[in-house]
Amino acid sequence: MAAADQATRTAPSRPAARPPHGDTVRLALVGLVLALACGAVQLATGAWRLPLGWDETVYVSQVDPRVPDAFFSEPRARGISWLAAPAAQLTGSVPVLRGWMLLLAAAGLTLAFRPWLTLVGRRVVLLAAVLFAGLWVVQFYAGEVMPNLYVAYGALAGAGWFLHAAGDRDRRRGPLLAVALSVAFTALVRPYDGGYLALALLAAVLAVRAWRQPRLAVAVLGGLAVGVLPWVIEAYLRFGGLLERVHGAGEAQGGLSLHNALGMNLMTLNGPLLCRPCTSGWPNPHASAVWWLALPLLTALGVLCAARAGRARTALLAVWCAAALGVPYLFGIGYAAPRFLIPAYALLALVVAECAVGAAKGRWRPVVVAALAVCLGLQLWGQYGIMDRRTARQQALRSDDEWLVARLGDYGIRPPCTIVGEQSQPQAFYGGCSSQASDRADRTQTVPGIVAAARRTPLALVQPTPGPPAYARSWPAHKVVTPRTGTVWYVFLAPAPGTALR
């Protein structure tokens, strides 16, 4: 940051000006086009009717009046549930919910990139939006009830408005309020990531002399405090205090300590959605992996191109915030999921777009533009192929869970009911039952808790192994094989409520 300060000392400070109306309209139109393209991808791959995944069922159950609330563990935050609430309250239709989330994703894309229009220019912003939205992981999670894409939007907007506020000679309140709201929104949907973003912006305040303004630090800290407040209140209401919840959140993530998860993230580049443990092996060596391996080089070149245009600070802040949001998932946990890096991709897309726009100048511009267009086309086509395969795989897995729940209904497991087992949360959601998943912090996942639940409602233990625990050895057993994936489940039915349980 100090080097950037020196390199751009003579550059005029960027005022917190509104982008020209025409640029705002263009960005909105691009957002609309990308939303339509994403909708077309959802239709083509069948993602619009994809049953809810494990984490989604937890978030949606908190606001869907038709199903019991799932256990809400320490790391989770309720911001994403509140975003899904309007559709979830209205109807239990999955396509309606997917459509609502797509609308939110499109609006978020436009709002997040808007502050960058006067910082890096229209061409860079529009290309960055296409690069980011073209990633399969963004297309997939645009319709999902998951927080990572909204962390990306909050971080992107926060960094952009931070630059506006830092360069505002008139010291207006609008950009500062936008910074605070962006940080608050990020923390509301994912408190840890909101903290990483706040730390990155506070470090930037200290690192660059021109940014050492107390009002910037107050805006960042104030936004963080507002964003984490619901999470902190819930910590005292449900988990015994803030420190207990923080400790429990770390344990739920497998312990937060130094790991090298670079290889794991490469393994998940084309899926699966979660690599825990990472046993899928390396991805096939084809074009879809090239962009990820080339990303550090493209980022470095993008910073150089931005520096030549007098925007070194802007590019470096984007890289710095991307690192703050990405490094904890690359080196702080012992597993990987492609969605964890979505916020970093959003910020780095701006820098990569700087590289592309900077390269498309000079006498060779037509050749460079043509080459970039070919590369972009290949990238988008490759990402679509991954999206199609990931969606098909998830469709098979989740549809099998729905089929299994229908079979449980044949055995008398109907609402009100309880399902116990490692995969009980999504299965219970599909069947309208209560769940007692094998979550470390779910205190009802004890023998007394299960016995008590069986006395109240029909209960089924569903597990992938034939040997039941001691409390279920006398229960009637059924072997069930799902039709699409051939997964074998063993179902143990508790005696009817009112029957004596041992």
Image: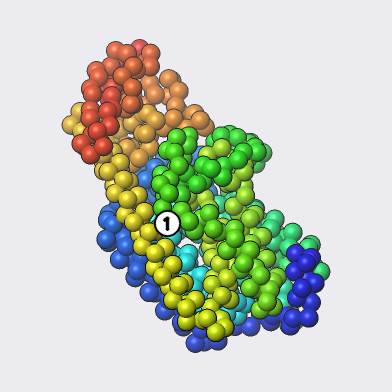
The quadrant holding residue 174 is bottom right
Give the residue furthest to the left.
Answer: 410
Residue 478 visible, this orientation: yes
Q: Secondary structure at mark 1?
A: helix
The quadrant holding residue 462 is top left
Name the quadrant of the C terminus: top left
Between 215 and 495, the one lying in front of the other is 215
Vertical order, 254 against 138 (above or below): above
Q: Residue at x 51, y 55 (%)?
A: 292
- In the picture of the structure, the residue carrying the numbered disc 1 is 287
Vertical order, 224 against 15 (above or below): above
Q: Residue at x 33, y 37 (%)?
A: 428
Residue 7: percent from left, percent from top: 77, 73
Residue 34: percent from left, percent from top: 39, 70
Residue 78: percent from left, percent from top: 50, 51
Residue 224 visible, this orientation: no
Between 240 and 190, the one lying in front of the other is 190
Q: Residue at x 69, y 82 (%)?
A: 15
Q: Residue at x 52, y 81 (%)?
A: 364
Decide if residue 129 is on the left or right side of residue 257: left
The type of residue carrying mark 1 is Ala
Between 241 and 431, the one lying in front of the other is 431
Residue 439: percent from left, percent from top: 47, 32
Decide if residue 256 is on the left or right side of residue 284: right
Q: How is the image coloured?
A: rainbow
Name the quadrant of the N terminus: bottom right
Decide if residue 38 is on the left or right side of residue 44: right
Q: Please tell me how many numbered marks the rendered image carries.
A: 1
